[in-house]
Image: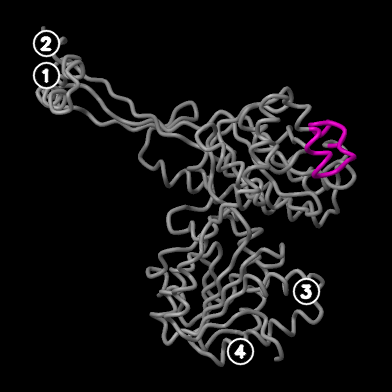
């Protein structure tokens, strides 16, 4: 096979030491640049946004927002339009179903959900589920073309009930967006698209400008400048998750179709040179078979140079002694995307603790998850799958607690309130209940 596509670990102790080093890296130089951009947007609004777009995205950007004419005139071939509509339909169905499952048994009125329980003496306690008022969606762009990211980030917000959505994305060389991005936004019912990317886009959504409204929460994947801006603006605006460079893990045993596994492995590192690909196999011969199939594909792949660079820098293969060790490796990797290509893959599902999305079996390709199955493809990266979830309707709703006590209900818990006020040295807290007994 010649020079291997990636580093291969056959020693488990060495493999786990390597995986323990994974995580989000903070670049101080990037941080300093981002801080300056954020402050510029905060103080100068649209003027700073437009300058940033012209400097980093396209010198031909002449307006902060896409015009009505751009939106109306955008067109794509019928095949592409059908694909966009199919994806929107499936993603919306999935997230509508999630919303129904989450609120089963809740009362619904005016688009809000609530539940209540009775207190001992006639009062009630419960919760209300409310959609966010305004969401900002970041869509990668520039030289890239990602109508799927429009769909995968906007539709969960729409299913949650968000009424006001702003998309920000880097413009292309011509100063506008690709027709596919504009059509996807139009089909989703999104009318406000800002032609700015990077840290300036995140800052504009967080602070608001003359053209871009301040939002309650920002969602969507981006580059290191986008993620650093999110980090610095945490607390000022709601944020989804750390969605950095794409990554994949493919788990195989000796029954796997090597060609299928190879293509799934390569699919997620096709985006850029900083993408990461992990391959875990219980069989060394099968691992080599997958690597050979990958090499054969790369002989004619249009983006072979990008894939090779990604695998050379961030590609890693592991030989596990058995399926138990293989699963330990997978959980240590905590991948964004996980393909499970083994005998009876569904039997392993309960042992997969850390993965953004899990794709089971030979006929659930990575690309199906990216485009058309239904769950959002915006997923936690850089081991964040240990504690974070894929983008979903819960990212665009908030829970309000609601309590209504009768006098008798308060009497029942007043001794506890008074005791806690004394324990914590906060007598007015206790008196808040006591005064109502006087």
**What residue is at 48 percent from the left and 36 percent from the top?**
397
Query: Marks 2 and 3, Cα distance to the nearest angstrom?
Result: 77 Å
In percent of the image, x 53 and y 59: which residue is there?
Answer: 382
Between discs 2 and 1, the one toward the N terminus? 1
Image quadrant in which you'd find residue 372: bottom right
Instruction: Describe residue 12's horizontal placement relative to residue 61 as left or right.
Output: left
Q: Does the magenta stretch include residue 253?
A: no
Crowding at dot 4, Cα within 10 Å, few <14 / some 14-19 / many 20+, comes out as: some
Whichever of labels 4 and 1 marks the residue nearer the N terminus, that label is 4
Whether 63 is among the magenta residues is yes
How packed mark 3 is, by other alpha carbons closer than 10 Å (few <14, some 14-19, many 20 or more), is: some
* Label disc, if present, on residue 411 of the rendered structure: 1
Mark found first going from the N terminus, 3 or 1: 3
Q: How far apart are marks 2 and 4 (CA)?
A: 77 Å
From the image, which quarter does the C terminus lie in? Answer: top left
Q: Mark 3 points at which residue?
A: 304
Query: Which label was assigned to residue 288?
Result: 4
Residue 291 in the image: state x and y as whole percent. 64, 84
- In the image, 7: left or right of 115? right
Q: How many marks are shown on the rendered structure?
A: 4
Q: Residue at x 47, y 83 (%)?
A: 343
- Tell me where residue 11 appears, x and y as whole percent: 46, 85
* Residue ID for mark 2: 437
* Distance of label 2 from label 1 (alpha carbons): 8 Å
Tell which circle, 3 or 4, labels the residue nearer the N-terminal end: 4
Residue contact between numbered discs 2 and 1, judged by CB atoms under 8 Å: yes
Q: What element carries label 1?
A: helix
Q: Which of marks 4 and 1 is in front?
A: 4
Segment colored magenta = 50-70
């Amino acid at each position: 096979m010649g020079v291997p596509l990636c580093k291969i670990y056959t020693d488990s102790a060495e493999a786990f030491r390597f995986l323990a080093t994974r995580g989000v890296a903070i670049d101080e130089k990037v941080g300093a640049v981002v801080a300056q951009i954020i402050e510029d947007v905060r103080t100068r609004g649209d003027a700073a946004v437009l300058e940033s777009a012209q400097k980093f995205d396209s010198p031909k950007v002449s307006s902060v927002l896409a015009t009505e004419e751009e939106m109306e005139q955008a067109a794509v071939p019928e095949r592409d339009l059908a694909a966009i509509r199919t994806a929107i339909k499936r993603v919306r169905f999935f997230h509508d179903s999630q919303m129904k499952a989450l609120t089963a048994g809740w009362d619904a009125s005016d688009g809000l959900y609530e539940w209540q329980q009775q207190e001992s003496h006639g009062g009630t306690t419960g919760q209300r589920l409310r959609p966010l008022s305004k969401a900002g969606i970041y869509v990668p762009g520039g030289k890239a073309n990602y109508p799927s990211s429009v769909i995968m980030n906007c539709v969960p917000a729409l299913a949650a009930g968000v009424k006001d959505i702003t998309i920000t994305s880097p413009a292309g060389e011509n100063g506008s967006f690709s027709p596919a991005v504009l059509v996807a936004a139009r089909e989703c019912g999104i009318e406000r698209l800002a032609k700015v990317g990077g840290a300036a886009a995140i800052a504009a959504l967080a602070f608001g400008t003359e053209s871009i409204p301040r939002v309650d929460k920002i969602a969507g994947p981006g580059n290191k400048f986008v993620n650093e801006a999110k980090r610095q603006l945490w607390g000022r605006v709601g944020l989804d998750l750390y969605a950095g460079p794409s990554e994949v893990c493919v788990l195989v045993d000796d029954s796997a179709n090597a060609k299928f596994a190879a293509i799934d492995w390569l699919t997620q590192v096709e985006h850029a040179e900083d993408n990461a690909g992990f391959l875990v196999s219980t069989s060394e011969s099968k691992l080599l078979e997958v690597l050979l199939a990958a090499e054969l594909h790369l002989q004619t792949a249009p983006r072979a140079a990008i894939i090779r660079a990604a695998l050379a820098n961030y590609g890693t293969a592991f030989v596990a002694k058995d399926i138990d060790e293989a699963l330990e490796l997978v959980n240590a990797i905590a991948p964004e995307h996980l393909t499970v290509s083994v005998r009876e893959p569904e039997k392993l599902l309960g042992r997969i603790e850390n993965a953004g999305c899990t794709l089971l079996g030979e006929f659930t390709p990575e690309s199906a998850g990216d485009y058309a199955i239904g769950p959002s493809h915006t997923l936690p990266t850089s081991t964040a799958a240990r504690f974070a979830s894929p983008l979903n309707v819960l990212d665009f709703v908030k829970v309000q607690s609601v309590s209504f006590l009768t006098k008798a209900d308060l009497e029942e818990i007043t001794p506890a309130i008074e005791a806690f006020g004394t324990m914590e040295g906060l007598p007015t807290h206790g008196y808040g209940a006591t005064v109502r007994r006087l």
